[in-house]
Amino acid sequence: MSSPEALRQFIERHPRLFVLTGAGCSTDSGIPDYRDAAGDWKRAQPVTLQAFMGDRATRRRYWARSLSGWTHFRRAQPNGAHHALAALEEQGRLELLVTQNVDRLHQRAGSRRVVDLHGRLDVVRCTECWHLLDREEFQHELLARNPQWARLEARSAPDGDADLDGLDFETFDVPSCPRCAGVVKPDVVFFGEGVPKERVETALRHLERADAMLVVGSSLMVYSGYRFARAAADAGKPIAALNLGRTRADDLLTLKVAAPCAAALAFVLTT
């Protein structure tokens, strides 16, 4: 385990960084993360695509929880880690930023060279005709159909939803696509759903041009993120990880710092 000073030196030595961020990058913005220090789930695993598409009751439960959690999620503001990474881009030191997060906080902090690997939660799409809806507009429709659910208070969960276990979701009314009446889902990659090929290919092209990889707030336990660490290692590129806990790529790392992301990157905003 290394110190934040070693992280600073790593960043200064490598002017073309490929950055991958995960849930730990947004915890200082009030969005919970998924895993504990051992890399294990803190709660039940997120819903799978197969369950969401195959079971109407699962969709009702998902959207009821999302209705409660969206208000908190959309109010989250970028924290120091987001601003530090935006500053590195402004300094010309980032080849690309790939995020596993769906909160768009990197873009709100000013980052422009961003691949939203797992999509974005502020958009809803039809699974049949691919019509896109603004999540805020969809929230208004959810509330209009289910006004009694607006009064519920619940603890925020990582996916922009909320913990509403033990309730009866049978009467929750989920809108269909306004164009084709198809099933709608957030425009994010669910578990059991593949990351769009073009996003992966774009990221890998930029990784080839980078001189090092920096992981910020990700355990890399899911393959969608781990693949980039594996590719970097295979190409002989050094990898640094800033994460509070075990990562799947620990044996590939050149440097590892266990510290909160915003605090460890604060030096970027003072230089």
Image (tube, rainbow, N blue to C red):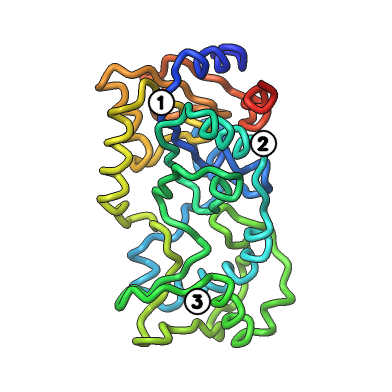
Residue lying at 39% horizontally and 69% vertically, measured from the top left: 52
* Residue 233 in picture, x, y percent from top left: 30, 21
Out of 245 and 114, give the one closest to the viewer.
114
Residue lying at 67% horizontally and 36% vertically, measured from the top left: 80
Among the 4 quarters of the image, the one containing residue 48: bottom left
Of the residues under marks 3 and 1, which one precedes in the sequence? Answer: 3
Q: Calculate the distance from the C-alpha at mark 3 to the C-alpha at mark 2.
A: 36 Å
Of the residues under marks 1 and 2, which one precedes in the sequence? Answer: 2
Task: Kindly identify which residue carries mark 3.
Answer: 60
* Residue 123 in picture, x, y percent from top left: 48, 66
Q: Calculate the distance from the C-alpha at mark 1 to the C-alpha at mark 2.
A: 20 Å
Of the residues under marks 3 and 2, which one precedes in the sequence? Answer: 3
Say what amino acid the circle numbered 1 marks. Answer: Met
Left or right: residue 227 compared with residue 115: left
Foreground tag (3 vs 2)? 2
Task: Kindly identify which residue carries mark 1.
Answer: 213
Determine the secondary structure under disc 3: helix
Task: Judge the density around disc 3: few (<14), some (14-19), many (≥20) Cα neighbours within 10 Å.
Answer: some
Instruction: Identify the mark at residue 80; answer none if there is no mark.
Output: 2
Q: Calculate the distance from the C-alpha at mark 3 to the C-alpha at mark 1.
A: 40 Å
